[in-house]
Image (cartoon, rainbow, N blue to C red):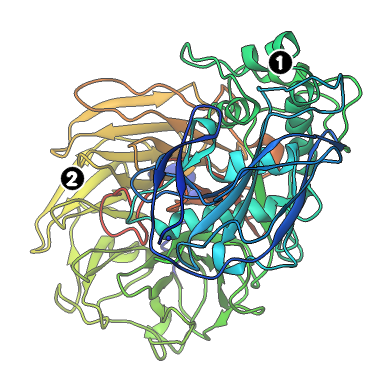
Amino acid sequence: MIACCFAPPLLKPAKRMTFAIAGGVLLAVLTGCAAPATSTSVAAGAADAALSGRVVGGQQPIGNASIYLYAAGSTGDGTGAVNLLTNPVSTGADGSFTLTSDYTCPSSSTQVYLVGSGGNPGISPSTNNTASLLMAALGDCGNLSASTYTYIDEVTTVAAAWALSQFLGPNANVGSSSTNATGLRNAFLIANNLANTTTGMAGGAPLPSGSTMESAKLYTLANVISACVNSAGGSSCSPLFTAATQGGVTPSNTLDAALSIVRYPAANIAAVFNAAIPASPFQPSLSAAPHDWTMSITYTGGAVASPTAIALDSTGSIWAANYFGGSATKLSAAGVPAAALGFADPALNESYGITVDGQDSAWITNQESVYYVNNGDGCLSKFSSTGQLLSGSGVTSSIYYPYAVAADSNGDIWVADNGHSQASLLDTNGNSLAGANGYSSSALPLPVAVALDGSHNAWFAAEGSAVEVTPSGTITEYPCCRVPSAIAVDQNNAVWVTDYSASALVQLSSSGTVLQTISGHGGIYYPESVAIDGAGAVWVANYRGNTISAYTAASGGASSSAISPSYGFGLDAHLGEPFGIALDASGDVWISNFAGSSLTQFVGLASPIRTPLLGPPAQP
């Protein structure tokens, strides 16, 4: 059998290196220092439940803090939140509070959170630290009960800042667009993975078994804002607010400071670290400044084994193609495996590519199939959203050594067939729309990746080139690169190609003209995959660098600049040969670790996109 594809970089034959490889309830819109301002009424919803908890600063009670129970808005990101409480509530001297019949849920699925504003952190009796603003993300309002007990402290605050960074506006104003309720809800789930709101400590109870997170980094940032929380405000908060200043905007409270830090994770890293008080209350914490202020969770469940490409479905669940193991992995948006042993298919073999279609079915390429399927020349496996195998012994129509696959918004499936240098175009049932042998041409040399533009054309990363193939089979080659490894199309139909051996990122216009080549900054180093976020920023997984790189959107002739530092993002996450990259509707960046046999989620780092990805990225 001739090996006509490229294996993951550690398995790559020398070949890849030598050629181009809520009713009647008084609600307050959030303004100012998280204080109620405007009354609004919403339709009556779920019955209220008694709630209790404590507001704590540095593990010391905060008395006389104002308590708010907010419902997240649905009129835009970072706006529209309303206070559900009908009466003012303040903490006692021990930081405790109780909500009895003070609120009504607008609906059971409304995302809610608690805020503790101001108060006395145990210093002089007349103190009211107006710079102290703490938060705890709760989640579904319908899940609140008399047993709900909530700690609001620095740990829950920074966890919310990371997880909700794409939905959090100034002064604890949380909201999403009306079309992205799923992304918002999943972000609340991740906030509860990062912090346990019952104890106020890192690592929420829902965190799946075997998962790891950067607890010491979370505690370190909690210690940083604790220096301000446990004071009278004023000059005690200056180091934090100065370090968190971005774009000429200086925060005036601790939550906004935390939000600024996580939104600009490569800025003022040492200054932020040094803002912590000497006697830091949360341990273990970092002994030195981190490489960046990104936050990651790494998952090992679902039989993930040397994962390659990854893709998201409409619920925010993530699918991974595994090079080894004979099964596909699916995790929920909160990292919980859909099946402990994955979803098996005897045809799964040397799986490199994956896509999720408009029905949430997953298509996986098997580059060199087992001998009794398509004569060993490769096939596709198709699974339903629940893991049912839909492809029988494999989709083989016009398939020949398939490496990558992409689903279109019209239901079509495009396949990069590395063998015979061809493209396959399939309908939703796996039947060929491109004849018995697909679209084959010397102008499509050894394709390894495919992405779709807004006109339903497929763009392939091939040997030395980006290649456009129309649905009717017209093939046009555009030389651009040395060893292309991945390809993506942005909102303006510009094409982005990662050049593996050149450690570069190349942008082409929709007509194939090279617009810019990025190398030598932002940490790009042997890039294996690429994705575009909802704001047009470009994200790259660096296989050999064990990092991710990010670059600003480029349009109108402007060049991109690096968002990531010179060494890239994610060194603290200890990535293991990152192969695939995908983005979700919560703004998370997902990475598959080929060597680590795991999936890593960088929380709230990117601008959200609609999933599944069907053509160019779109805002959810």
Q: Which residue is mark 2?
A: 477
Indicate the amino acid at tag 1. Answer: Cys
Which numbered disc, 2 or 1, marks the residue that appears first in the sequence?
1
Distance of label 2 from label 1 (alpha carbons): 58 Å
Regarding residue 9, the answer to whether it shows in the image is no
Q: Secondary structure at mark 1?
A: helix
In depth, the one of 46 and 263 nearer the eye is: 46
In depth, the one of 299 and 392 nearer the eye is: 299
Q: Is residue 25 left or right of residue 429?
A: right
In depth, the one of 365 and 208 nearer the eye is: 208
In depth, the one of 573 and 4 nearer the eye is: 573
Tell me which residue sits at (38%, 44%) in the image. Answer: 20
Q: Quadrant of residue 145?
A: bottom right
Q: Quadrant of residue 385?
A: bottom left
Q: Which residue is mark 1?
A: 237
Give residue 163's position: percent from left, percent from top.
Answer: 58, 46
